Image (cartoon, rainbow, N blue to C red):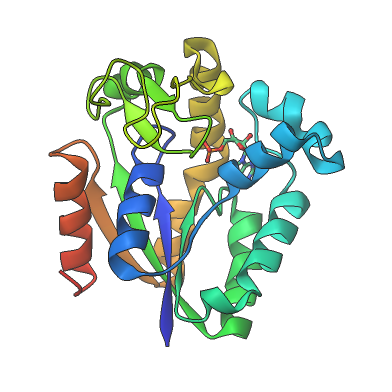
């Protein structure tokens, strides 16, 4: 049975960075609902127009929308050998739906919960930058590009995410506490494999190494 790695943790805990590193190391797809939604917004699809205001306000989009996106993505053949879910599920209702989909696909949920001190989150997120061309992620403090605010891969000028402003980050943290934190209790109660990993100790590669060890793939 293959694993569906579920990365939990507040915004800014490094889920996206870890998902990229782990996907490379494990050779399985990285599924980020945030990235998929941002692509819809950029392409101005019907879904993108529906979620744009919700996302820029730092709130969660309706469960049915993300459930449909993830269900479709998990039905593709590249997920048969496992996958990494980044930013999904974010509510207990999403987790319940995901449990059914994973069971149907023969995938075992494995939780990696990235814990980060709340005080460092806002500083960390406001230093976040992304390449608008290839999507590579940087952090001006913890993972800076070689050249000032330019992508290492293609030299494009890096940009901050629209919802990474301090005010919106505070709202995203509130949404996390109210809607996503209960998931930790939910997963502990149903008894799935659950690993707690400090997300703010060491470089991203070291944290990824720790996760791989916990998974028995170090
Ligand atoms: P992220 O890139 O994971 O921080 O997601 C950015 C934004 O996309 C969030 O603040 C939400 O508005 C939306 N989003 C992403 N994933 C979900 C999800 N699983 N449930 C609801 N909204 C989501």
Residue shown at the point (77%, 54%) measured from the top left: 64
User: Image check: 116 left or right of 8?
Assistant: left
Quadrant location of the N terminus?
A: bottom left
Quadrant containing ligand 1 reads top right
Single out the residue that lies furthest toward the front: 154
Quadrant location of the C terminus?
A: bottom left
- Identify whether 155 is placed above or below 97: above
- Identify whether 144 is placed above or below 22: above
Q: In which quarter of the image is residue 62?
A: top right
Q: Quadrant of residue 179?
A: top right
Where residue 18 sits: x, y (%)? Answer: 32, 49
Where residue 56 sits: x, y (%)? Answer: 66, 22
Where residue 166 sits: x, y (%)? Answer: 47, 12
Callout count: 0
Residue shown at the point (40%, 33%) measured from the top left: 154
Residue shown at the point (64%, 57%) measured from the top left: 94
- Identify whether 74 is placed above or below 65: below
User: Image check: 172 left or right of 213?
Assistant: right
- Identify whether 38 is placed above or below 25: above
The answer to which of 125 and 135 lies nearer the viewer is 135
Single out the residue that lies furthest toward the right: 46
User: Image check: 200 left or right of 22?
Assistant: left
Where residue 108 sits: x, y (%)? Answer: 45, 78
């Amino acid at each position: 049975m293959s694993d569906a790695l579920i990365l939990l943790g507040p915004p800014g805990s490094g889920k996206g960075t870890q998902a990229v590193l782990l996907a490379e190391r494990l050779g399985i797809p990285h599924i980020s609902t945030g990235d998929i939604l941002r692509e819809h917004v950029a392409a101005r699809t019907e879904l993108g127009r529906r979620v744009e205001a919700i996302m820029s306000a730092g709130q969660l989009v309706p469960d049915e929308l993300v459930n449909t996106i993830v269900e479709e993505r998990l039905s593709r053949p590249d997920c048969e050998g496992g996958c990494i879910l980044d930013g999904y599920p974010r509510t207990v209702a999403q987790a319940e739906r995901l449990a059914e989909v994973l069971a149907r696909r023969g995938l075992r949920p494995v939780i990696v919960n990235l814990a980060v001190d709340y005080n460092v989150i806002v500083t960390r997120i406001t230093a976040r930058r992304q390449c608008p061309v290839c999507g590579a992620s940087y952090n001006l403090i913890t993972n800076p590009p070689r050249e000032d605010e330019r992508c290492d891969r293609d030299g494009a000028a890096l940009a901050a995410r629209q919802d990474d402003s301090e005010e919106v980050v505070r709202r995203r943290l509130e949404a996390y506490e109210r809607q996503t934190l209960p998931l930790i209790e939910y997963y502990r109660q149903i008894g799935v494999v659950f690993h707690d990993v400090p997300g703010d100790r060491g470089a991203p590669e070291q944290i990824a190494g720790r996760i791989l060890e916990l998974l028995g793939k170090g």
